[in-house]
Amino acid sequence: MKNMYNWYVCKLDIHCESEVEGVMDITNRCFGENYLCREEITEEYECGVVKLPTGKICGFVLYKGKETVEKPGFGVGFIKTIAVDTLCRKMGIATDLLKYAQEELNKMGFQYSYAILWDRNEKLVSGIFAAQGYAPTQVLKYHWHNQNCIHCGPNACKCDGIIYKHISQRTIPIL
Ligand SMILES: [Zn+2]
């Protein structure tokens, strides 16, 4: 995945300390300390990163395939988080991260995917999801109830989550 700025998307090398640190730096700055822990990045989820030619990481996406609760045996892709460093925004990086995660989920056999957008961030990222065929379907009140939140404070989140489903699977139950 090349582009005019020469950044590219690839899989995080979980054995490379500087790469893992690069992702931790971005999540701590974008969402607050401890929003994501190291194990979520290296073990629980798959992680794609955007690298500049210098090797510096300037964005990442976390995703995984999971079975639905309402429809056992049916798997969907879940896009957990997309984050881009402040200085590297408005360059199409988030779009490429979303496309990358979808392609990887497709390869893993997950045809459909969804994401839960942070209500305070929705305006910033809804266009990116909409352009890839996602649409809002449901609001989850206090979705991150009492978790750490850069807006609400430590263990005090009262923000809502908004489910964005890929258009082709809007009628499929996922939660
Ligand atoms: Zn909050």
Image (cartoon, rainbow, N blue to C red):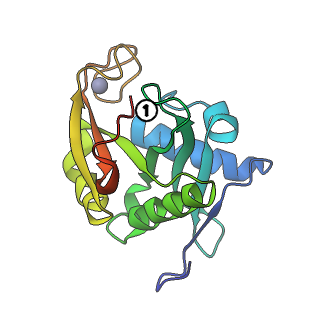
| Mark 1 closeness class: few <14, some 14–19, many ≥20 residues within 10 Å | some
Ligand 1 within 8 Å, label 1 CB: no
Residue 59 picture location, percent across and down: 50, 57
Q: Quadrant of residue 142?
A: top left
The residue at 62%/47% (across/down) is 46
The residue at 59%/59% (across/down) is 104
From this view, report whether residue 12 is shown above or below residue 143.
below
Residue 125 picture location, percent across and down: 28, 53
Which quadrant holds the C terminus? top left
> Along the line of sight, which residue is nearer the eye, 11 or 89?
11
Side (left or right) of 27 relative to 160: right
Residue 1 picture location, percent across and down: 56, 78
The residue at 64%/72% (across/down) is 54
Quarter, ligand 1: top left
Disc 1 residue type? Gly
Residue 13 picture location, percent across and down: 74, 54
In the rendered image, which residue does mark 1 sit on?
Answer: 32
The residue at 58%/41% (across/down) is 24
From this view, report whether residue 41 is shown above or below residue 131.
above
> Along the line of sight, which residue is nearer the eye, 21 or 4?
4
> Along the line of sight, which residue is nearer the eye, 71 or 81?
71
At mark 1, the secondary structure is loop
From this view, report whether residue 12 is shown above or below residue 62.
below
Side (left or right) of 174 relative to 171: right
